[in-house]
Amino acid sequence: QTKVRVFEHLRCDASLAEKTGFAEGDELLRVERVRRFDGTNLIFDKSLFLASCVEGLTPEIVSKSVFDYLEGELGMVITTSNRTITMEYATAEDREVLDLLDFDMLAVVENHTFNNQGVLFEVTWSRHRPDYFTFYNSAVRIS
């Protein structure tokens, strides 16, 4: 299950532009979601979407699948996602939102996602309880 906590429009300021890669002045959609598995809040997503790329997005759509909507309804072709995975101490907000048990650290996956025109349309920080987090990567070299 996905619960939408925040769904609001905002204008990208200089600080946010430096942190995300969006341009200062861009209209963004700020979305926060809590992912619940087997009755336990395990993942806290904080996302920023370029508003011009996600027209018609609603909290109901966000609670189901943003990418299904973007690809299926809007016809967007999503090509690249750059990910950085770090470990961070849980914040007071994390403790409020997630069922952390005795964990004080979270796995944090930062995604910068681009469409086939090279436009950055999403930046997400997914904050995962570590006992449910797995990283798998497959690297292929083409000679």
Image (tube, rainbow, N blue to C red):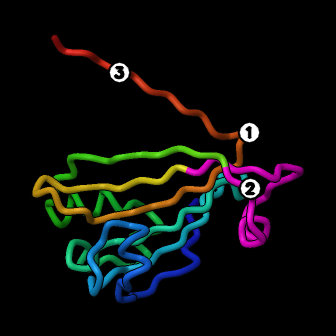
The residue at which mark 1 appears reads as 131
- Report which quarter residue 127 is drawn in: bottom right
**Residue depicted at 58% across the width and 77% down the height:** 5
- Report which quarter residue 17 is drawn in: bottom left
Q: Position of residue 40 (x, y in %)?
A: 74, 55
Count the marks.
Answer: 3
**Which stretch appears magenta?**
88-108
Quadrant of the rendering where the N terminus is positioned: bottom right
Indicate which disc residue 89 carries: 2
Indicate which disc residue 139 carries: 3
Q: Position of residue 134 (x, y in %)?
A: 59, 34
**Type of the residue with mark 3:** Ala
Q: Secondary structure at mark 1?
A: helix
**Can you say whether 21 is above or below 6 in the image?**
above
Indicate which disc residue 143 carries: none
Marks 3 and 2, the one that precedes in the sequence: 2
Q: Are marks 3 and 1 in contact (CB under 8 Å)?
A: no
Q: Residues within 10 Å of mark 3 (few under 14, many from 20)?
A: few
Relative placement, left or right, of 86 versus 17 is right
What's the distance in space between the residues labelled 1 and 2, CA to CA? 14 Å
Q: Nearer the viewer, residue 24 or 33?
A: 24
Residue that protrudes farthest toward the right in the picture: 102
**Residue depicted at 65% across the width and 57% down the height:** 36
